[in-house]
Image (tube, grey):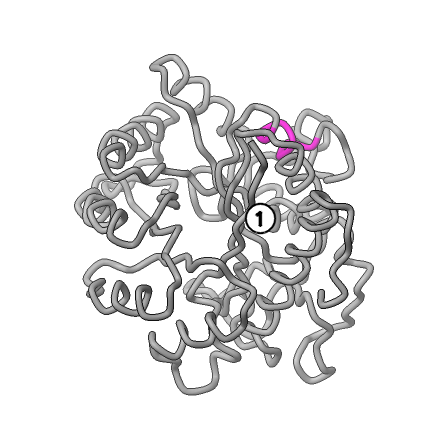
Amino acid sequence: MTPTLQIGVNIDGVLHRDDMPPVDAESRFRMIADAGVFDYVEMNPPEGVALAPYLGLSERYALPVRVIGGIFCAGRDEAHLRHIIEWAPRFGSKVLNCQLYASHADGHRLTDAEVAQFYALACEWADAAGCIPSLEVHVDMWSEDFGRIARVGELLARDGIALRLTLDHSHLIFKIGNAYELDVSNIRPLVEAGEIVLDPISPRAIFKQWIARGWVHHAHARSVIPNNPPNSRMRRPNGMAGRGIQYPFLRPAPDQWDGNWEEAALTPWQDAVRHLINVRAQGHAATPQHISCEFIPFADYGGGAGYSIFDNNVACAAWLRNLWLEQTTGQHSMAA
C-alpha cells in the first residue's frame, strides 16, 4: 500500500498574536481553509464547550477534525473523555490524543499500572467510535519521565493492548543540555550514563526506539532548539517563566523575539522530524498517518511573542509537505 501523510494544525495555533483581539471559531476555520496547506484540524475542546458549532464549521469548510482529544486527570475527567469519544465519529476523528496528568485527582502520583489502566479504558470506549487513543509525550504529564514509557508499553502488551503514542520531538529536544529540565524529567542520571539518549542524530535516540517498536501513532510539529531559552514574555501559574518549548520556524523581527535567532539552530529538530517522515515514507504501517503543526501561544510555547503564530504553522506545513514530496517522489516543491 502506498503510504500517505496528512498534515493538519491545532486550532489553538490559528491566531497571529495573543495580544490581539480573540479569533472566533469561524474565522479560525476560514484561516485554515484559506491557507491551502492543511488537510485537517486538531482540536482539544475543554469540558463544557459546545461541540455542535464546531461540527458545522468542519462541514462548511470541508476540514475534518481528524484528531480530537484533551488534557485529562485520572479520577476526575473520565466523563469528559467519554463525551469526546462520543463526538469523535461525527467529526471524522481517527486519533484521540490524550495528555494524562502525572497525578490522580486525589493527589497521588499515578503508577505505571494506573496509566496503563486509564489507557486501556480509553481504548475500550473508543473502539466502537473508530478513533484510536494516543498518549502524548508531554511536559507536566506522566510521560515527561521518558523512562516510564517502555514500562507502560510492556504492561499493556501483557494484556494484548498496543501502546500508541503522540510524539512531539520538541518536548524532548528542548531538554538537551538543560540540567533543570532533565531533573524535572527524572532522567539526568540516565542521560549522563548514556542509558537514555536525546540527541536526534544518534541511532540510539529514545524516540527512534519508540518509532521502531511501532508505538508512535500520531505526531506534532513545533520547532525548538536544544536548551531552548525560557519564554520570558509569559509566566506559568507558579510565577516562573514559560519553559521554552517553541523556537520560531520563521525568522522573527528583532522586537518579536528575545535573543538571537539562528536558522542553523533548528537542525536537530529538523533531523528528528525528517527521521519520522523517512520511516513513514518507507511504508511502515505503524507510523503516523497524521502530523499536526502545533505552534501555539501559551506560556511554555509562544505566549507573549511578537511574531505570528499562524504564519509559523503555515510555513511548517509547507516544509513538511516538501519533505514528504522529496521522500516519496524525489522531487522538490519550489512553492515550499
Residue in the foreground of this view, choosing between 185 and 94? 94
Q: Amino acid at mark 1?
A: His
Going by the image, does 11 lie left or right of 290?
left
Tell me the quarter of the picture where residue 317 sits.
bottom right
Q: Which residue is mark 1?
A: 171
Q: Position of residue 15 (x, y in %)?
A: 48, 76
Which portion, as a residue range, is magenta? 205-211
What residue sits 58% from the left and 38% below the top? 3
What residue sits 39% from the left and 40% below the top? 102
Going by the image, does 153 lie left or right of 90?
right
Q: Position of residue 65 (x, y in %)?
A: 36, 56
Q: Quadrant of the C terminus?
A: bottom right
Q: Is residue 24 above or below residue 88?
A: below
Tell me the quarter of the picture where residue 211 sits.
top right
Going by the image, does 258 lie left or right of 103?
right
Secondary structure that dominates the magenta span: helix
Secondary structure beneath label 1: helix
